[in-house]
Amino acid sequence: MRHSQKGFTLVEIMVALVIGLIAMVVIMQVFSLSESRKRSTTGGGDAQANGAVAFLMLERDMKMAGWGLDTTAYKTCTTTKSYCNGTASCGGTAGAIPGLNFGSVQLVDGTSGAPDTVITQYYANPTTSTYRVPAISLLKGTMGTPADELTVSSTTNCAVGDLMLIQEPTGGALGQCSLVQATLITPATLKMQHDTSGAFNPPATTQVADGWVKHTAGATVACIKKPSNGPFFQRRYTVDQVNRVLQRSDNATNPVQTNEVVTPEIVDMQAQYGVAPTGSQDVNSWVDATGSWAAPSANDIKRIKAIRVAIVARSAQYEKPAKGEACVSTTADMAAKWSSWATFKTSAYPADWNCYQYKSFETIIPLRNVIWSNL
């Protein structure tokens, strides 16, 4: 009996394999294109999220800037004498404390296209259980020398180690203030000393040579809780362009935060002061922290009522261009429209900067504690 056998011939199998391979190539190309589009879309979403987080943190701190500020503690200060013995406790620089001011927010302008730095300042660390507004008392007698101990109306809420900001009253050397550190407090006799064991207290000869004021009766004495270094608590926001992160540092008593990462893929930040006329709360001009505004005077500091900030966030997804072509994910024309006022110098970015997607953010933040204090 003869049996017939049926099956595929070798030619048929080879044709089927070729058709299958062609279908596989088409499927993989479609999948690769779809995946590329998905990564681009996801990367754009990540940039959006990172920028939103960066703005959330910045806005929160800047809206609280000046928290704990009692205007009677410094309102008339136009010249403030200060000193540091060179130890880390007072900032590490011997002599008058550089850049000492009572501004709620300070800007440091970036140079050669670098990002700006934003510093928020408080008169105590608002995140600790020991936070308190400055305790205010009055000087009961005129000082014989600038180094004399103080006899005050009250020592309540003042402690050894606190800073004492002494402000001359109307009728005295108005506008003249002194910043010293309490080294001994005797509540029974309402006495507070500031001898040279305190890092902020100069020798008597230095006080005389530098023209420190012998404060008169009626001067206000504000006790301020100092941070680990420097006179006031500060938070500093900077952009690390190498690692593309927004980072935050402070001078808390414990622990000090140094370059804490707030959010990744932030490549630039620009900021300006919103300035009002003297005696007004209405901003009528915006200025960079350059020229006279790099270190504004005491009177100009009181004119700063708002800050505006612009941030650029980048997608982490590199978008490879077609062979032989340049990247066009972001063009110079696109970058020019990132902000209505800020100038972002893409020439300072890495050479392949336009192979990525970017999201830009900008806002105006009123300094409400300054406005409410009606400076």
Image (cartoon, rainbow, N blue to C red):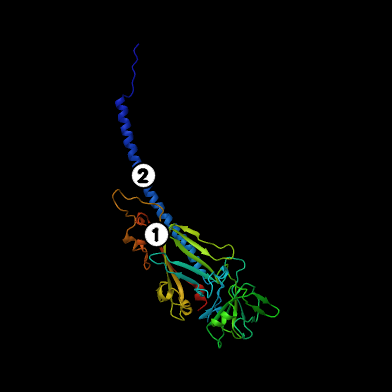
* Residue in view at x 42 percent, y 56 percent: 47
Q: Are marks 1 and 2 in contact (CB under 8 Å)?
A: no
Cα distance between the residues tagged 1 and 2: 25 Å
**Vertical relation: 327 (above or below) 118:** above
Q: Which three-letter amino acid code belongs to the residue tagged 1?
A: Lys
Whether residue 125 is visible, yes or no, is no
Answer few, some or many: residues within 10 Å of disc 2's Cα (few below 14, many 20 plus, some between 14 and 19).
few
Residue type highlighted by circle 2 = Ser
- Residue located beneath label 2 in the image: 32
Mark nearer the N terminus (1 vs 2): 2
Q: Nearer the viewer, residue 369 or 7?
A: 369
In depth, the one of 81 and 270 nearer the eye is 81
Q: Residue furthest top?
A: 1
Task: Report the residue marked by disc 1.
Answer: 359
Residue 316 spot, x, y in % from top left: 41, 53
Q: Quadrant of residue 140?
A: bottom right
**Residue 250 shows in this picture:** yes
Left or right: 164 in relation to 35: right
Q: Is residue 328 above or below residue 118?
A: above
Q: Position of residue 91 (x, y in %)?
A: 54, 69
Q: Position of residue 263 (x, y in %)?
A: 47, 58
Q: Secondary structure at mark 2?
A: helix
Q: Which mark is residue 309?
A: none
Q: Quadrant of the N terminus?
A: top left
